[in-house]
Image (cartoon, grey):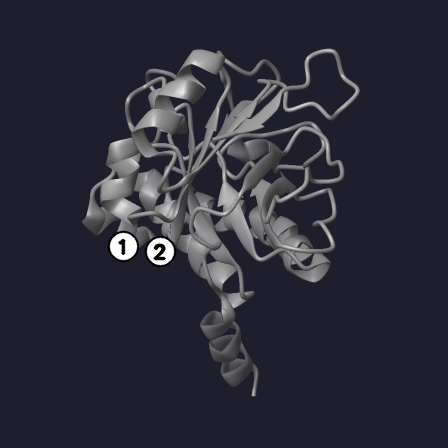
């Protein structure tokens, strides 16, 4: 019976609706603006009452609010995000141990009613030299935790990392993409070649937002946010859509 239940759960997941208005709320949750149908929020938050909800999980790097086994946390800090340390996924045993930590978070996502999960920092192997793991290990780990999300009825987003191939995406088990600054980096087309219109794009600079809107805004959801993804009322809050 447990096996049958798992199969039914796998059959239940689905990617978000194409080109639906999107809001990126991983910093702080708030009432979605009018017309928004897809929202991404941190796993510690609750999904909106309506619409499609993506659950943000930092699966490849540590955060203070998540308890990681010390033997998995490398003394290699993400240079862009002080306080976040890379997770060692260099062996099958370590990938299984890391997946057990992620399992607790995605079970929380499923229990709260999220529809999908985005695993952030897939490309952590590119951040620091001399790591005990690389791209092949990252993709093996991604496949492991994607299968666990699917078994809970959650679709899985590829977060960034535009250089993946179709074969790598298929093997990892990604269902759609969430791309930060694909307009700035001129990568929106790369994600669309992999996923068609099943892409959610976030820009943090107005000029990059305009560029992305001109290039792909009639096909995929593009949102402008402030880099700290704050809520309305903050002096830094920004939100716009194509």
Would you say 10 lies left or right of 134 here? right
Q: Is residue 131 visible?
A: no
Q: Residue at x 75, y 36 (%)?
A: 30
How packed mark 2 is, by other alpha carbons closer than 10 Å (few <14, some 14-19, many 20 or more), is many
Camera-nearest residue between 164 and 64: 164
- Observer-nearest residue: 164 or 226? 226
Q: Which quadrant of the figure has residue 110?
A: bottom right
Q: Which mark is residue 170?
A: 1
Query: Percent x, y for residue 40?
Result: 59, 41
Instruction: Give the number of the disc on residue 114.
Output: none
* Residue positioned most to the bottom: 1
Residue 123, compared with residue 104, is above or below; it is: above
* Residue drawn at x 64%, y 49% as measured from the top left: 105
Residue neighbourhood size for the residue with mark 1, other residues' Cα within 10 Å, grouped as few (<14), some (14–19), many (≥20): few
Q: Nearer the viewer, residue 160 or 133?
A: 160
Percent coordinates x, y for residue 82 in the rendering: 59, 13
> Mark 1 near mark 2, Cβ–Cβ under 8 Å?
yes
Image quarter in which the N terminus is found: bottom right
Q: Residue 107 in the image: state x and y as whole percent.
A: 64, 58
Numbered disc 1: secondary structure: helix
Q: Circle 2 sits on which residue? A: 173
For residue 91, which quarter of the picture? top left
Task: Report the residue at 59% width, 37% height from top.
Answer: 23
Q: Position of residue 25 (x, y in %)?
A: 64, 34
Point 50% across, 47% down: residue: 20
């Amino acid at each position: 019976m447990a096996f049958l239940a798992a199969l039914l759960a796998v059959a239940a997941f689905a990617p978000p609706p194409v080109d639906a208005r999107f809001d990126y709320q991983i910093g702080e949750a708030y009432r979605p603006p009018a017309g928004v149908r897809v929202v991404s929020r941190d796993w510690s938050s609750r999904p909106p009452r309506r619409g499609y909800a993506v659950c943000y999980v930092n699966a490849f790097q540590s955060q203070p609010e998540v308890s990681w086994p010390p033997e998995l946390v490398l003394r290699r800090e993400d240079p862009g995000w002080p306080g976040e340390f890379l997770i060692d996924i260099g062996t099958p045993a370590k990938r299984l141990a890391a997946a057990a930590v992620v399992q607790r978070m995605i079970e929380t996502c499923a229990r709260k009613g999220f529809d999908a999960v985005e695993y952030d920092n897939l490309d952590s192997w590119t951040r620091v030299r001399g790591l005990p793991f690389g791209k092949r290990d990252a993709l093996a780990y991604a496949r492991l935790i994607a299968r666990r999300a699917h078994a809970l009825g959650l679709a899985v987003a590829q977060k960034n990392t535009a250089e993946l191939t179709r074969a790598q995406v298929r093997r990892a088990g990604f269902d759609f993409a969430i791309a930060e600054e694909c307009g700035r980096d001129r990568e929106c087309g790369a994600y669309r070649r992999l996923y068609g219109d099943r892409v959610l794009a976030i820009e943090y600079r107005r000029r990059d937002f305009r560029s992305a809107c001109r290039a792909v805004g009639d096909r995929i959801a593009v949102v402008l946010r402030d880099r700290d993804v704050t809520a309305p009322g903050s002096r830094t809050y920004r939100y716009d859509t194509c």
